[in-house]
């Protein structure tokens, strides 16, 4: 299947979390879009599906998964893919994403996003599996770079080269996680700007922003803190390279009230307004004192 990589800019979104369901339906906050965790909605019926349908009638949605295990040597899980496709047909997401990783072997799920060796053999293996998934789903998918805490002796290329080669070979798109780049850069001792500079802007469809836990000698991707200044600075550089890319904040633990997350998302809007030329971007930011920011 040949795809046309046309980037759609959705604006600024948040991860849809159970804690915020009622607030969103009651107040219809000025958020551009929501990202759902695919696995949370694969069981038909029930309250989660009710809320998903109701919120999906008000906002654009994208689907983000953690169980594709695209890098595993196990066969692709066709039952999972069938459930994913069924959900996509019901939700009609703007796009579907998962991670460049493996999550288990011999049918055992580690419940973690495990890194791959960066070799051409792995590129070919992963690209072939992505092509199968895209053909089955009938759409191009996004693959996200993961944070890592170890490296393989067999690796013979940098992570950014590996990610780029996988996207090119499979004709897939990239979900660039800015926090994961920062975490891996700290853990492995490379410059995060180098990573950004070697990724093809035409392949980048979405950004993730998140917080992490900094232990000095190493950093853990925990999604339980506010986005730190270091990640905001890297986000600014990413905007300079990639332009207007749909951006969202992930928060998976210590989840604050909705208005606190919305205020944090405003920081992303403000940085984009300051960084990108207005003639190339039309941003409708959340109201501040009755005024709209960055409206062209």
Image (cartoon, grey):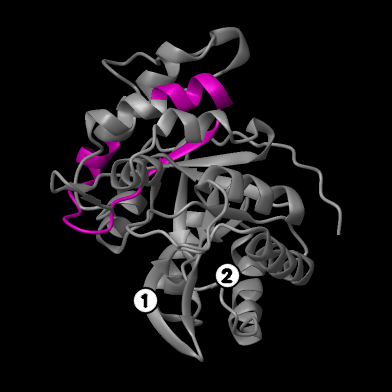
Magenta span of residues: 236-262
| Residue in the image at 53% along x and 52% along y | 61
The one nearer the camera, 143 or 10, is 143
Horizontal arrangement in the rendering, residue 192 relative to residue 262 (left or right): right
Q: Is residue 261 magenta?
A: yes
| Position of residue 267 measured from the top left corner of the image (x, y, whole percent) | 30, 26
SS at badge 1: strand
Q: Is residue 256 above or below residue 100?
A: above
Q: Which residue is at 51% across, 32% downward?
A: 196
Magenta region includes residue 152: no
Q: Is residue 103 left or right of residue 282?
A: left
> Within 10 Å of the Cα at label 2, are there few (<14), some (14-19), or many (20+) other Cα atoms?
many
Look at mark 1 in the image and give the residue it sits on.
111
Question: SS for tag 2?
Answer: loop
Q: Earlier in the sequence, mark 2 or mark 1?
A: 2
- How far apart marks 2 and 1 lie (CA) works out to 14 Å
Q: Can you tell which quarter of the image residue 245 is in? A: top right
Q: Which dot marks residue 71? A: 2
């Amino acid at each position: 299947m040949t795809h046309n990589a046309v980037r759609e800019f959705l604006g600024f979104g948040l991860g849809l979390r159970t804690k915020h369901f009622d607030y969103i339906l009651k107040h219809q906050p000025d958020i551009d879009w929501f990202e759902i965790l695919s696995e949370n909605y694969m069981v038909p019926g029930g309250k989660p599906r009710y809320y998903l349908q109701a919120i999906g009638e008000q906002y654009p949605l994208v689907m983000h998964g953690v169980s594709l295990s695209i890098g595993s040597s196990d066969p692709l899980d066709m039952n999972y893919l069938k459930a994913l496709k069924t959900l996509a047909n019901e939700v009609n997401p703007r796009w579907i994403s998962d991670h460049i990783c493996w999550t288990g072997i011999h049918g055992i799920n580690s419940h973690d996003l495990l890194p791959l060796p960066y070799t051409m053999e792995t590129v070919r293996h992963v690209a072939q599996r992505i092509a199968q998934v895209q053909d089955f789903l009938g759409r191009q998918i996004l693959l996200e770079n993961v944070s890592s805490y170890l490296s393989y002796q067999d690796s013979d290329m940098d992570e950014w080269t590996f990610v780029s080669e996988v996207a090119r070979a499979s004709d897939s798109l990239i979900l660039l996680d800015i926090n994961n780049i920062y975490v891996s850069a700290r853990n492995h001792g490379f410059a995060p700007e180098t990573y950004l500079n070697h990724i093809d802007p035409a392949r980048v469809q979405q950004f993730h922003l998140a917080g992490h836990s900094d232990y000095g000698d190493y950093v853990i991707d925990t999604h339980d803190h506010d986005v730190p200044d270091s990640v905001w600075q890297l986000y600014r550089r990413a905007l300079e390279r990639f332009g207007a890319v749909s951006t969202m904040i992930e928060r998976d633990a210590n989840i604050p009230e909705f208005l606190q997350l919305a205020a944090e998302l405003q920081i992303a809007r403000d940085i984009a307004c300051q960084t990108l030329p207005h003639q190339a971007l039309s941003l409708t930011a959340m109201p501040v004192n009755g005024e709209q920011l960055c409206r062209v």
